[in-house]
Amino acid sequence: MKSSSAQGRTAPQPAQRSSEQQDLTMHNQYISVSPTENINVKTEGGPSLKKKRYVRKEGSCNVTFRHIPEEWLLFVTDIFTTLVEIKWRMMFLIFALSYILSWLFFGILYWVIAIAHGDMRDHRNDPCVYEVRSFTAAFLFSLETQTTIGYGFRGMSENCMIAIILVTIQDVISCFIDTFVIGIAVAKMASARKRAQTVGFSNCAVISLRDGYLCLSWRVGDFRRYHLVEGTASAQIVHFTVHATGKTDVTYEDLVIQQRDIVLVTPTTVLHRIEHGSPLYKMTLEDLRKADFELVVSFTYTDDTTGILHQTRTSYTPDEILWGHLFQEMIRANRSHYRVDYNLFNHTAKVHVPMVSAEEYEQKKQLRLSAQKSPRNTDKAVPRAETHGNRLKTSAVQVEVVDDVPEKTESTCQAGRKCPDALSPPDGAAEAAEE
C-alpha cells in the first residue's frame, strides 16, 4: 500500500505530461527578440534590388504623368491653381514679365497715337500726351501711369479722346494684375505644403507587444507651439504587382487605426493592432524582410491659426519597420508644465517580442489558456497564466515628475543602431526568454 501510494504521488498523470509537453513546445517555438542582440534574417536569393518609393519620406508622390490630353488647356483654365503650385522662381518670372510686357504694350500704343496725331513731326502742335514725342518717352509714360509714380513732366491732355480711353483701360488692367499677384503670393505662402513640413513622422515604424497583442506603431508630432485641431490618422499598405508584359498593378489595403482622432498637443504614437483581418496578421519577421510593399501613412488636420485643412504623408518600407522595438518616452512633467524632448522623437529601444506571426501567436496563446483551464490543472494554471501574462506584456512607460532643471539624457539608439536596455521588460520576461 505504501509503495503504491508513493508511486502514485511521483508518477505524472497523462494530462500533466501532455500539458508539460505543450509548454516545452511553446517555449521552443516562441523565439523572442532579445534587447541586447541584433536581428539578422537571411532571405533566399541574396539581397533584393532597392525599388523606388511610391510616396517619398517628405510626403510627395514619386509619380510622373505623360501624354495628358489637352494638358496646357487644363492648366490655363485653372490658372490660379497652376500659379500656386509652380515654383517661386517661375512665379516671379511670370509676374515680372506681366508688368514689363504690359508697360511695353501700352507704350507702343501711346507711341502710335503720337505718330498719328503728328506729335513727332511738329513739336509746336498741341500733343495728345505732354512730353511724349519719342518711343522712350511713350514707354516711360506707360510705366508712370500704371505704377502711379507721376513725376510731373508727362501728362494727359484733352486733345485726344482715344488716348484718354487707353489710359483708363491701362489703369483697370493694372488693378487686376496687382490683385492677382498679391492673391497668388498670399496663397502660395499659406500653402498646405509649408504647414505640412512642421508636422513630422518618425523615421521608422515599430512592431511590439501591447496589451497582449502584436501592434504596429509609428509616431507623429507637431513642431509648432500653436497646435492643430481635428486631426485624423490613416494608413494603407500599397502592393505592386509587375506582370511579364510590363503591366504594373497597384493595390491598396486599409489598416484599422486604434483611436484615429488625435488632438496633437504632444507627440502621439499611432497604433494598429495586428489581429484577424489585418494584412500583417500572417506575417512573421522573416516574411516581413522578404515582403514587397510600402506602408503609406497620413495625418489630416485643421490648422488652429488659419483654419485651413492640411495633410501630411510619409511612407515606410519593410526595412524601416523594426520588429521588437519600442519608442522611448519624450514627455516629462515638472511642477508647472510638461516638457517634450524632441531629441528622442526617433529613438527606440529593443524589447522582448515573439518572432512568430500574430496568427501563430494567438493560436499558441489560446492553446495555453485551454490547457490551463483543464479540470486537473486548475490549481496550477492560475499562477502560470499570471506569469505568462506578465512575460508577454511590455513594460509600461510612465510620465516622470522631475524638477525644472536641465538634465542629461542617457545614451539612446535610433533605427539600425545598437540599443541599450533602456526599456527592457520585467524580470519575468527576461527569465522566460532565457528558458
Image (tube, grey):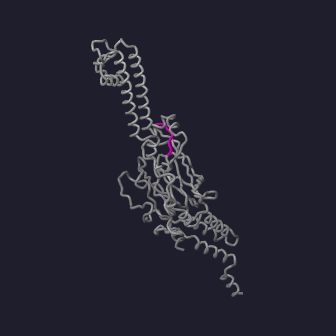
Q: Residue at x 52, y 73 (%)?
A: 434
In screen coordinates, is 21 left or right of 348?
A: right
Asked if residue 188 is positioned above or below residue 165 in the image, the reply reads below
Quick check: can you spot residue 259? Answer: yes
Which quarter of the figure is the N terminus placed in?
A: bottom right
Where residue 99 appears, as percent x and y from the top left, is: 38, 30
Where residue 272 appears, as percent x and y from the top left, is: 57, 55
Asked if residue 198 is positioned above or below residue 7 in the image, the reply reads above
> How many numbered tags mark residues here?
0
As drawn, the residue found furthest toward the front would be 121
Q: Quadrant of residue 240?
A: bottom right
The front one of 290 and 47 is: 47
Quick check: can you spot residue 428? Answer: no
In screen coordinates, is 409 left or right of 218?
A: left
36 falls in the magenta region: no
As drawn, the residue found furthest toward the right would be 1
The front one of 102 and 274 is: 102
Where residue 55 appears, as percent x and y from the top left, is: 50, 51
Q: Which residues are magenta?
A: 306-311
Where residue 28 appears, as percent x and y from the top left, is: 58, 74
309 falls in the magenta region: yes
Q: Residue at x 53, y 42 (%)?
A: 230
Which quarter of the figure is the C terminus placed in?
A: bottom right
Q: Residue at x 43, y 43 (%)?
A: 194
The front one of 156 and 121 is: 121
